[in-house]
Image (tube, helix red, strand yellow):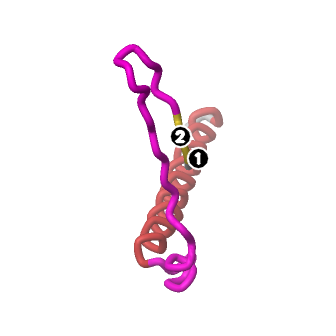
Amino acid sequence: MNSSRVRAIRLTIAAIAASLLLSAVCFAMFAFSLMGALHGEEAAVEEPGLSLVICAGEDAGADITFCGI
């Protein structure tokens, strides 16, 4: 085999290995977030939820505005 073909094969194998490693890290972070291991159970309870209120004007032609958060 010539050197360019060997280099291409090694680059392909390295790209596959990096992709598998990144996929494993992403899956682990997803699993930890589902279990609540990153923030802890107490921190999740104490943090207030984020809410958004959308109000419409009284007449039908009024623009929709954000009344509060």
Residue contact at pointers 1 and 2, CB within 8 angstroms: no
Identified at 53% across, 40% down, the residue is: 67
Identified at 54% across, 85% down, the residue is: 42
**Which quadrant of the figure has residue 31?**
bottom left
Mark 1 or 2, nearer chain start: 1
**Which quadrant of the figure has residue 2?**
top right
- Residue 6, image x and y in percent? 59, 41
What amino acid does circle 1 point to? Answer: Arg
- Residue 15, image x and y in percent? 56, 47
Please identify the quadrant where the N terminus is shown: top right
Residue assigned mark 2 = 67
Give me the disc on residue 50: none
Give me the disc on residue 10: 1
Q: Does the segment drawn in magenta span residue 56? A: yes
In this view, the residue in front, 17 or 4, is 17
Give neighbour class at mark 2: few <14, some 14-19, many 20+ (Cα, 10 Å). few
Give neighbour class at mark 1: few <14, some 14-19, many 20+ (Cα, 10 Å). few
Q: Does the segment drawn in magenta span residue 45? A: yes
All told, the count of numbered labels is: 2
Identified at 47% across, 70% down, the residue is: 33
Is disc 2 placed on a helix, strand or loop? strand
* Alpha carbon distance from label 1 to label 2: 58 Å
Magenta range: 36-65
In this view, the residue in front, 23 or 6, is 23
* Residue furthest bottom in the image: 42
- Residue 32, image x and y in percent? 47, 74
Per the picture, the main secondary structure of the magenta-coloured stretch is loop
* Residue furthest top in the image: 61
Identified at 45% across, 38% down, the residue is: 54
Is disc 1 placed on a helix, strand or loop? helix
What amino acid does circle 2 point to? Answer: Cys
